[in-house]
Image: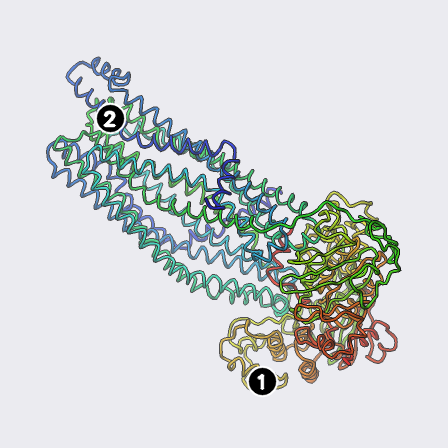
Amino acid sequence: MTTPGTTARRGTATAPLRRALRRHPHQLARIAAWSVLEAVPAFLIGHAVARAIEDGFAAGRPATGLAWLAALGAAWLLAAVAARQIVLAVAAVAEPFRDDLLAVVVHGAVRRAAATAGARRDSAAVTRAGLQVELARDAFAAVVTTVRGFAFTVLSVVLGLLTLAPGAAALVLPPFAAGLGLFLASLPALARGQRAFLVADERLAEATTATMGGLRDIAACGAEEREGERLAARVAEQARAARALARVTAVRTAALAVGGWLPVLLLLAGTPWLLRGGAGAGVVVGALAYVTQSLAPALGGFVQGLGVSGVRLAATLDRIAASGTEEAPPVPRLRPEGAEVRLRGVAFAYGPHARPVVADLDLRVPEGEHLAVVGPSGAGKSTLAALVSGLLRPDAGEALIGGVPAACAAPSARVLIPQEAYVFRGTLRDNLTYLAPRAPDGELGRAVAALGAEDLVEAAGGYDAPLDPAVLSAGQRQLVALVRAYLSPARLVVLDEATSCLDPAAEARVERAFARRGGTLVVVAHRITSARRAGRVLLMDGPDVRAGTHDELVRTAPLYADLVGHWQPEPVS
Amino acid sequence: MRAGDRLVMDAVRRGGPWPVVLAVTAVAGAAAELALPYAAGRTVDALTGAFAGGATESSAGVVTGLEEAFAGGAGGWPAACVALVACVMVCESVGVWARGASGARAAALLRRRVLRHVLGAGPAATRRFPEGELATRAGLNAEEAGRAPETVTGALALLVPTAGALVALTLIHPALTVALAAGIVLVLLVLRGFLRTTTAIAGGYQEAQGEIVARLVGALDGARTIAAAGTADREADRVLAPLERLRRHGLALWRANASAGVRAGLVVPLAEVAVLAAGGLLLASGELTVGELYAAARYAVLGSALSTGLGLAGALARARSAGARLADLLAIPRPAYGARGLTGPPAASNGGTSPTGTPSGGMSTAGAPNGGMSPTGTPGREAWSPGTLEFRGVAAHGLAVGDLVVPGGSVTAVVGRSGSGKSLLTALAARLADPERGTILLDGVPLPELSHDELRRAIGCAFDRPVLVGDTIGDAIALGLPVAPSEGVAGAPPAGLPGAPPGGVAAAAAAARADGFVERLPQGYATPLPDAPLSGGERQRIGLARAFAQAGRLLVLDDATSSLDTVTERQVGRALTADPAGRTRLIAAHRVATAARAGLVVWLDDGTVRAKGTHADLWRDPAYRAVFQDPAFGEPSSDQETPHADKPTSPKRAVAQEKTS
């Protein structure tokens, strides 16, 4: 991969991060302000312990000692309140961050699905991306919380040590800085290890799921051994990645130990020197308290926050950025003159090495004509529908609607209704007026009546009742999509097996209604009866494409005769 | 000891030295950590005492005192500190390494074992557990069970200092323990309150999440409509509409978290302050030294770590239950295979034998004319020819087959209403299930006595909804061939399109009428499965091709052409009827045309064989005709592409397919 590409990807990966941090400056200020308060015990602990011993208990004034400890307790209470506020402020940044990521994922998925016209469904990948978003949010919150906590605690401890016993600071800070440096140096390796592990783990999970879904087929093919070996290789790969990660983590832990424990030893070794400098035993214990109660836990949190959550955040952001898409380049939208469909020398294949689905196809459907497209499944009927309506661009030749390239035609110029009807959660009215948002009730009622959808409206509980797509039958869903197409302003209607789940009578009613509606009608036929109703029939069988009336084709095309013959209901007795 | 525990113990035992290292570092590290505060306190006492003792003397005296202190004059405490810190550092680092390594190793061992077992059990596993459940158990639960040693040692590493801290505190002064005990009780109460709140709120959050996912899947299903309407952004916004609700529930979750965090965050420091206060008073009354006070404060903090210990108890319980769930998988019985082979001309080859090929071997009636189409095939050996399948007194799971002979080289249809046992009969024939009673023989050899490889070379099986396994379309078709496709199936790839498959695959694809659409895929046979948008009918044809390529003697089709359109079904049907390899074809189907083409029809009704005969004979029975009018089968003229079947398959299947590569 080239460096510019990687840089660009990294840029898009961290963009939501930067946006989240920049968008709410007042929340960041709130976090900082409460952090100061939260860090008070970290500053106070050494002083309070030292003074409580030196001036209080050891000096025979227990009341003074208790007062210092009470002050420390009060500081802890205050810090707890501050901690709560910090969590809420971090949440106020993390929740919009999650929203942003989710928007990236959803927009990317919908746009990509639309761009490929649903050819490749990746609902599983989308679900995984949703999970990644949650991981990213938690990791983001953890990183913000721990890095911030670390910074403020270190500042407090440094201040505390300097004011309590400057000599102690000289003993504590160098080994602490060494440990911190060691950790930061190990961070890239840690990130690499973590990412490698995530990838290996995911690959294993995918392979496992696929195998578990195909147990019957694997057994039937006698491929248990082969699949077992494939899986075992994945298992070994994942275990290797886990062991490698464990090794790097050990280095990280060593860094933590150096930064957290060496200061304790140095403090103890330097105790005589501190005492000579006039410090009392209480001061030594206070300095020890700084290290063991404040500095070491903060370093531990930092190592955990950056070493685990930070690395996970980077990995998931990369993944999410990859699932999003760039803004599609704007397509010039042209308003066609009329609704004549014209294909000139159109060729189309799904890949450079694929056999073409359509080759050198010429077709003219004059405005107002009703054309039926028939052929065996896989003959390219849906591909033709997509080419006519501009969802696919021809590899060669041109596809025109009313004189403009179909791919550039305004969406309102034509409507394509596929076999799998799209009905979304919302009201029935929202669904029906999807392509004509301002359709008056009268027009809506006329369309419903023309297509015979009155029962559907009644079953749905009227136009404005919330609609759950899952409770509709496939036929009802198709009816919703058909009313939607009928209401649209489009002069070219392409029905791609859009009536496949209706009974033959309902299908006939729908097709006749569309024929009366005016404009150009292209019907990819599911039943041969659709072809009988059309003025002209296009017969597709791979590269062999013929057009003609029903009667002509029955006489001249054996495949058509075959289709007609076998589409008849078989005699039952 | 439960089976799950035994399983985990076994994995730990075979996990090499890591679990031992883990245990040693955990215990040693915990002990060192426990001893350190005391040693540090004593060091402080010794050094301050030495200083106090030498304060009035010259600086040389101070140096001497110091030297004495470090040389053992202070009881060797400073040296002990150094040793203890070193021990803690080494144990922590090595322990982390050992933890990761032992977990990885144990999980991999468990996984390999479970996956191999489940693969061997095959469809029996799917009958017992849903496939998602199998994947979870072999994935997540193996990981959890692998973590058992880590959890045990982790608990040790926590309980030793915690319990030890309490003992040490008591030894220093019992009053200190009382102060701490009050704090720990508080920890427990707080944690209980925390657990109650979150589960209630998390429900609303997950509901909003689920709503977004459902909307998104709906929008993806309607991708063509959305593309045509140019409304991608509008639909994305519609999908995201529940975001508002998600955020509200999310913030509520954070608030609950924050409040619980405040309470939990307070307990340890307050317990420490309480111990410091009690210790301070003791110090004032001369019962405690400064060093002991320091040690007491540290022990208070260590003792409070009991709260994390509770989490570890939960983790241990999880690891145990994960082990039990793995043991459930290993309890699925695996079919046993014999070592016998098949005799006769077609052994281990999948072509070249004519339907009337003379059988040889142990069959006494060898050479009898092939009555493959005999309508009333009775149990007996008159009709024997290669690929003869005999059921003898077979009964299984509500299906009573009794005695039935599928003559070698014949086309035999199995018909019946849905639920009458057609699928089970075909599964028995292909040994994807074993009967409870009776024997099934292929060319005279009981199926369980056949070797695994011989069995699978002889029988090919195609399904209503085949799951395609492999990296590419070509791999998926070659799954049943003996050589791994990546290593190249016998024969050089023919010239032509790049990625063209070996001859056997292409021929099988042509017979199943799959060649046309495969060649239109972006990379032909080399197209990766996730990149191949297949309809239900196309998937069925790949499944058929796979079975055609594999079967040596017997082809078993379980509703395997249900999603094909009329013309394609007729073409495939012709290829089936005129199989040049002369294999026996056992076809469960619901189309009249299939039954009409078969030489013998086996009519199943409510789990029994109601009649056997030719389609023409049976057709006189109105009850037989009614089978094909069952609304569950679709219209009697079900010769059109079944509307629901040729759509892309269900998301679950799609996932399985997509993840195959």
Q: Which residue corresponds to the image point at 77% horizontal and 67% vertical from the top-left?
A: B569
Q: Amino acid at mark 1?
A: Glu
State which chain disc 1 sits on: A
Q: Is residue B108 above or below residue A273?
A: below
State which chain disc 2 sits on: B
Q: Are marks 2 and 1 on the same chain?
A: no
Q: Position of residue A42 (x, y in %)?
A: 28, 40
Q: Determine which of the numbered discs, if any, sits on residue A402 in the image.
A: none
Q: Amino acid at mark 2?
A: Arg
- Residue that numbered label 2 is attached to: B42
Residue nearest the viewer, comparing A229 with B455? B455
Q: Quadrant of residue B629?
A: bottom right
Does residue B243 appear left or right of residue B409 in this picture? left
Of badges 2 and 1, the one in the foreground is 2
On the question of residue A258 being in view, the answer is: no
Q: Which residue corresponds to the image point at 78% horizontal and 46% vertical from the top-left?
A: B489
Q: Position of residue B461 (x, y in %)?
A: 73, 57
- Residue that numbered label 1 is attached to: A454
